[in-house]
Image (tube, rainbow, N blue to C red):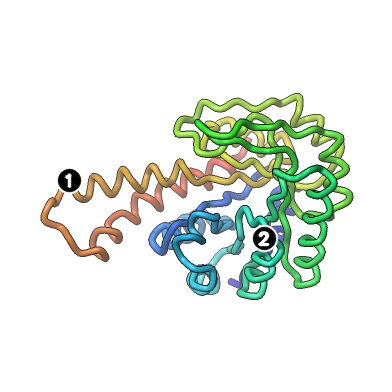
Amino acid sequence: MTRATLAEVLAPALRDGHAVAGLVCQGWEDARAYVAAAEAEGAPVILQVGPGARAHMPLPVWAAMLGGLADMAGVPVVLHLDHGTDAAECRAAIDLGFTSVMFDGSALSLADNIHRTGNVAAMARSAGVSCEGEIGFVGYADGAASDGTDPDEAARFAAETGVDAMAVSVGNMHLQRTQEGRIDRGRLDAIAARTRVPLVIHGGSGLSHDLRRDLARTSPVCKFNIGTELRMHFGRALRCTLDDDPALFDRIAILSSIEPALTEAARQVIAGLRAPA
């Protein structure tokens, strides 16, 4: 199946009351596991490459690897640049075949964020790909504090940038290791009342499966970014493999043995966002 844009997979999700998983990739094995999980569930998937992954491996390598997976997949696969902070990096991703880019201007003033995000959104649109932006600031567990999204600013941001999806700060937080997070539903509902742009929750690992499912069914949130939750599954599976066979040393054998557990964990994430009422 051909590569899909973010807009192409979020439109039916918004219409039908479910969400699409944005799964944060760190290498070949997890990316392959995520595509296998999506195929098993018959669902689209968004493969995301964040700043840490880009620092570890060059963007052209990511583009070739994820593009190959997408082109062989039996479900729509979005190649998404996550948390891009300059237009040049977003342009490079588009030129390499990414079908979606996120420009993260959340640390900028409102006017600068609108201006710079709007420029990237226009660039993406002219290339036939999608753009996600962020308004408000999603903080980090044990790190920078969140700055909640102002509903009126969100409405202006959506209208003036032309983004295909809008990440919001409504109690969600990056890098949470437990699923005890809470959402400010009043703030989320106020944002939803002012715009019809599909909404994105970063830090989805910090929310329970039930809460994610409920938000997908009852709000315009139709993309959840999931990274920490699946990285923790990867780490546990790796430790079990090495504990079970301390003499094991072959990289391919070690990492291949982890993929089934990671695929199953990703299936649970994907299925949970599409579960019927």
Amino acid type, residue under disc 2 in the picture: Val
* Badge 1 vs badge 2, beta-carbon distance below 8 Å: no
Mark 2 closeness class: few <14, some 14–19, many ≥20 residues within 10 Å: many
Left/right placement of residue 199 relative to residue 53 reads right
Where is residue 113? Give x, y as percent.
78, 49
Q: Is residue 99 above or below residue 158?
A: below
Q: Name the residue tied to disc 2.
A: 101
- Tell me the quarter of the picture where residue 80 sits: bottom right
**Which one is closest to the eye, mark 1 or mark 2?**
2
The quadrant of the rendering that contains the C terminus is: top right
Residue at 37% in and 44% down: 233
Of 257 and 135, the residue lying toward us: 135
The quadrant of the rendering that contains the N terminus is: bottom right
Residue at 49% in and 46% down: 227
Where is residue 35? Give x, y as percent.
48, 60
Left/right placement of residue 202 relative to residue 72 reads right
Residue at 49% in and 54% down: 52
Q: Name the residue tied to disc 1.
A: 243
Where is residue 42? Give x, y as percent.
54, 57
Of 37 and 106, the residue lying toward us: 106
Amino acid type, residue under disc 1 in the picture: Asp
Where is residue 246? Give x, y as percent.
13, 51
| Residue 16 visible, this angle | no
Q: Is residue 259 above or below residue 92?
A: above
